[in-house]
Amino acid sequence: MAKMSVKKENHKLDIAPSRQERVTVGQIILAIILIAFTLFAFLPVELTFVAAFTDEKSIVQNGFKFWPKDWSLAGMGTVLRYGQQLARSYTVTIFVTVAGTFLGLLFMSMYAYSISRKDFWLSKFLSIYLLIPMLFNGGTLSGYIIFTSYYHLKDSLWLLILPLCVTTMNVIILRTYIANSIPAELMEAAKIDGAGEYYTFFRITLPLMKPSLAAVGFMMATTYWNDWQNALLYIDSDAKKPLQLLLINIQKSIEFLLNNSNVPASARAAMGGTIPQYSATMATVLVVIGPIMVVYPFFQKYFIKGLTVGSVKG
Amino acid sequence: MKAFLHNTWKHRAHVVMALPVFLILFFIMYVPMAGLVMAFKNFNYADGIWKSPWNGIENFKFLLASKATFIQITRNTVLYYLLFTIVGTFLNVTLAIMIDKLVFKKLAKTMQTLMIIPVFISYAAVQFIVYAFISSDTGIINHTFGSSTKFYSAVNLWPIILLVVKIWKDTGYGSVLYMSVLAGIDSELYEAADIDGANSWQKITNITIPSLIPMITVMLLLSVGSVMHSDTGLFYQVTRNSGILYETTQVIDSYVLNAIFKNSNFGFVAATSFFQSIVGLLLMLFANTTVRKIAPENALF
């Protein structure tokens, strides 16, 4: 019997497929646990999509549902009736995101390039200068007072752009990429051929940095898109209100419309008498997070790479 | 001096290219650092930060006198850090190993894509999603279990709610880093273990986990530097900044934000910020020194 089993084992070893291909009970259990976790992560997102199109009465009576009985476009309709403010907020958010990401990438890669030049005598000083803000910072209050009463930038879009434009970690990621993935010979050769520093950087280094730029750029763009704190602190006027601030205020706006008798009758009539507040809120959430959901799959591989690069210092 | 000018001129292109970031860091990061002197001043808007009269350590005395608030927000900040870091690291690592071990690779990839999504949703939006689950009259939880818990006034439930939200938002993303380490393990190690007759569990404890230890150590140490800082949105937005819940939900960062909006108590806040920055600096230096000793290539400086 013992002999038999040994023989069987050996036999198994000979034809055993590599560990990647063996499907066992353990694997099935593993798959089930992972699917459960995926549902935990994704169902709330699904709920947002569904709730935005759920009939308001159904939410009030039965609560939010992952799959409702009654569907409705009323929530989305309400959001679109904000029309003008929504369009304005979209414009502000898109402008801040694009301008901030573009400027940040440009400035940070120039800085990363400069400090990675070994013969540049200031590079040591500039590296330390870059590092200090990561160790020590003045805090929100001090920043708030300096930006508003000394720079007089209250209600200025600059305060949505500049504070998130440069981060030490991102410069380190870009510098590491230049040091590890771009052959120094290439840049030296360009120099020998008589190319100036600007030409070398813009024509040779920058194009080769694309993967790291995509990774850092995507992370920056989501940070800009999702930033609510600077908006809440600094932005007052409706014309400069980004999407996140619109979202924070949405509850108040809806309550205002519901309770305030000063709202013109025509506006109320346009709402059909009632405002579907739950579905309208979720529809707004959807409108705010939607673009990232759409763009994210295309950038997934880059940002995973970027995350990995960032963890290993060159 | 001549050498200085000469070098600068020679490298003028580098100087020019470094200038924008230099200036942004200066005005956005460095100047507010100087603003921390507020902690030793009796601040008023009319005189501004620099001209407000000095008052020595009055603000800090005030800080210690108003024990309840200061201790409460510091305690919450530190305890949430510990809770999130311990549970978070455990789950990140477990999830990474599970995904790595799964033989259905296509399925694993799809699941990973879906799991990462929450990290890209801002807390301003998350609060409405959380509301859909725990609102007392329309929430999924109360409807499913037929209960009528008033979550938004249940102080003691919030550590659990915030933990679940944090796990939901960050775990998928947090596991990516560990997965990249796992992908780098030499498959010959596993093959050798197969030949020696090791079962899956033995392979995990003897090969997989030991190869993750360096990365886990480094990540933990580097996170030590941010003990005093929290995910402000989690505590400010998800709790709807509700005063009833402050006892278990208010952290230093959200307290500072509230003080700015209420335009009050700047002395107290300045002293708190100063404390926060100094402790952060010391912890960061400690963490980096330790990382340098055990894994020099991962040290920040």
Image (spheres, rainbow, N blue to C red):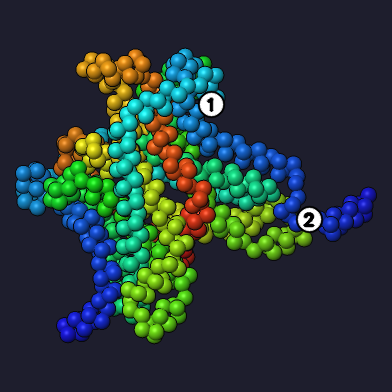
- Check residue A17 in the rendering and tell me which mark sits there, or answer none: 2
Q: Earlier in the sequence, mark 1 or mark 2?
A: 2
The residue indicated by pointer 1 is A66
* B199 over B268 or under it: above or below: below
The quadrant holding residue B209 is bottom right
Chain letter for the residue marked with disc 2 in the picture? A
Image coords of residue B264 (percent x, y): 16, 36
Crowding near pointer 1: few (<14 within 10 Å), some, many (20+)? some
Along the line of sight, the residue nearer the viewer: B202 or B93: B93
Taking the spot 42% from the left edge, 38% from the top edge, the residue there is A289
Image coords of residue A157 (percent x, y): 24, 47
Crowding near pointer 2: few (<14 within 10 Å), some, many (20+)? few
Taking the spot 60% from the left edge, 36% from the top edge, the residue there is A36
Taking the spot 75% from the left edge, 46% from the top edge, the residue there is A23
Chain letter for the residue marked with disc 1 in the picture? A
Side (left or right) of B273 relative to B130 = left
